[in-house]
């Protein structure tokens, strides 16, 4: 697949992260990530990450990075640009695929398989050791979702190959340090 929309809740380093992202095979992504009650609008294109400095995000930076309140006049409403490194190591289609393969090994005995409805769509549910994977029952059997109810984790996969292309924010909306 060239692209997919991934939304849901996952746990990374004991932190709960909510996300709603359009993700591309190229590694580009865009959408919203919410962590510690702070929503962040992010765009990653090539090796550059852009995070929108909303007032809510600025208040978080104020508390954690000790920025002066006056800095909001400079950066609020603008995108902060930085190398994508840490963000794309954590959130990428390649990383999600590796995690899926690691967490859902070939089970022995065979997983439980049943016909279900997942988010209003006919699906096959594969269950093993508390993890459920849902695949479309008709047409291409693409992944619809993964849940781990005991750990309050869920990811929904939608809009396969239909996520609109991303563009970097205009230069006038990117904070340049001045």
Image (cartoon, helix red, strand yellow):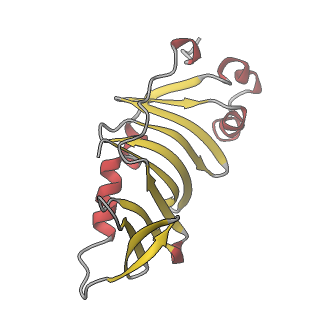
State whether residue 174 is above or below residue 149.
above
Relative side of 56 to 108, left or right: right
Q: Position of residue 88 (x, y in %)?
A: 38, 42
Residue placed farthest to the front in the image? 138
Residue drawn at the location 37% of the way across and 37% of the way down: 85
Relative side of 86 to 119, left or right: left
Residue drawn at the location 64% of the way across and 52% of the way down: 36
Q: Quadrant of the C terminus?
A: top right
Residue placed farthest to the bottom in the image? 109
State whether residue 35 is above or below residue 56.
below
Q: Position of residue 172 (x, y in %)?
A: 57, 12
Please tell me which residue lies in front, 77 or 116: 116
Report which quarter residue 3 is drawn in.
top left
Report which quarter residue 78 is drawn in.
top right
Relative side of 131 to 68, left or right: left
Q: Position of residue 128 (x, y in %)?
A: 36, 81
């Amino acid at each position: 697949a060239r692209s997919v929309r991934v939304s849901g809740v996952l746990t990374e380093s004991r932190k709960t992260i909510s996300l709603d992202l359009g993700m591309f095979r190229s590694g580009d992504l865009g959408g919203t990530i919410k962590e510690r009650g702070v929503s962040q609008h992010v765009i990653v294109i090539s090796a550059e990450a852009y995070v929108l400095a909303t007032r809510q995000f600025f208040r978080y930076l104020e508390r954690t990075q000790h920025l002066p309140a006056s800095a909001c006049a400079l950066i609020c409403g603008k995108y902060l640009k930085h190398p994508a490194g840490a963000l794309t190591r954590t959130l990428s289609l390649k990383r999600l695929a590796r995690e899926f393969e690691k967490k859902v090994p070939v089970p022995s005995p065979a997983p439980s398989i049943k016909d279900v409805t997942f988010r209003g769509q006919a699906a096959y549910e594969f269950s093993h050791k508390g993890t459920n994977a849902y695949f479309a029952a008709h047409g291409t059997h693409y992944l619809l979702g993964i849940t781990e109810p005991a750990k309050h984790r869920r990811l929904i996969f939608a809009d396969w190959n239909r996520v609109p292309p991303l563009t970097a924010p205009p230069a006038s909306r990117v904070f340049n340090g001045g």
